[in-house]
Amino acid sequence: MNWPKPSLQKQASHLHTTVWEKYSALPSGFYLGDTLKIAKNLLGKGIYVKKDGYEVIVEIAEVEAYLGSKDAASHAYRGPTKRNWPMFEAGGTCYVYLSYGLNYCMNVCTQGKGHAEAILFRAARPIHGIDIIRQHRPLAHNDYQLLNGPGKLCQGMGIDLTYNGMTFDRPDFKIVDLGIKVPSSSIGRSPRVGITKASDKLWRFFLKYSPWLSRKG
DNA sequence: TTGGTGATGTTT
DNA sequence: AACATCACCAAA
């Protein structure tokens, strides 16, 4: 093989752009309107993260909607705090929090500034950078367990509090349209996972029959 | 395959 | 004391 010399390799990678970098971020208007509808529309979309010289993109397979002051299970139910302030930012803002003192969880806010609605990313399918994701998730027994939970998704993608308050429209951090069509007939819904409040609300949405979910149905 | 439990930050 | 969790271990 006639590999380029290391110095040339470095130069080449500096100039290199991937197909994923050419995908543009969803417009801010995507995050306005009915949050439950936005949650469904996020299924099949992509989350792109580029950091530390690696690049990861995943397809969103499972989400949950949290409806701010109208929702007793929402972190924002009782107003702004030191932790939940990004929820009150404009739609398209990222809200990351530490769950149970252990795991990070990532949301995208919806609605305008001051309206604290958000959508939690619960599970996803690796599309690019699966080797990096495997390195981040050494305890996963198989690839279906890489991103099948909100904490695992953050661990796999390398999401931590440095992303808290960022917007999903950056060259190195964005939500993109992958061109995947998701008919409403292939979307399932259920009560949200792990909460007891408002358990009558079917605000968890997922790609029906997907093997990448945090749990079935 | 399931069910209980520890770890542990933020808020009530 | 509850919680938008995860991984481990024991029991079945």
Image (cartoon, coloured by chain):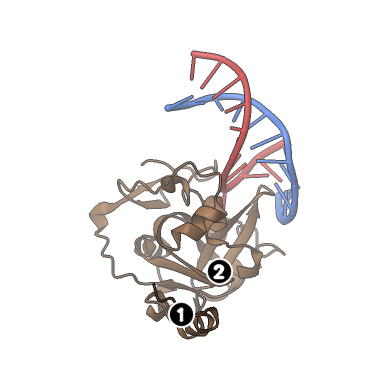
Chain colours: A brown, B blue, C red
Query: Which label is found at residue A94?
Result: 2
Is residue A211 shown left or right of residue A93?
left
Q: For the point 35% across and 46% down, which residue is it?
A: A211
Amino acid type at image mark 1: Pro
Q: Do labels 2 and 1 share a chain?
A: yes
Q: Nearer the viewer, residue A143 or A1?
A: A1
A188, above or below A84, in the image: above
Crowding near pointer 1: few (<14 within 10 Å), some, many (20+)? few
Decide: is A95 above or below A134: below
Q: Can residue A71 be seen in this view?
A: no
- In the picture, the quarter occupied by the C terminus of chain A is top left
Quickly name the residue at label 1.
A4
Q: What element carries label 1?
A: loop
Q: Is mark 2 on a helix, strand or loop?
A: strand
Above or below, A75 against A191 in this view is: below
User: The numbered mark 2 sits on a residue in which chain?
Assistant: A
Q: Where is residue A12 in the image (x, y as percent from the top left)?
A: 47, 83
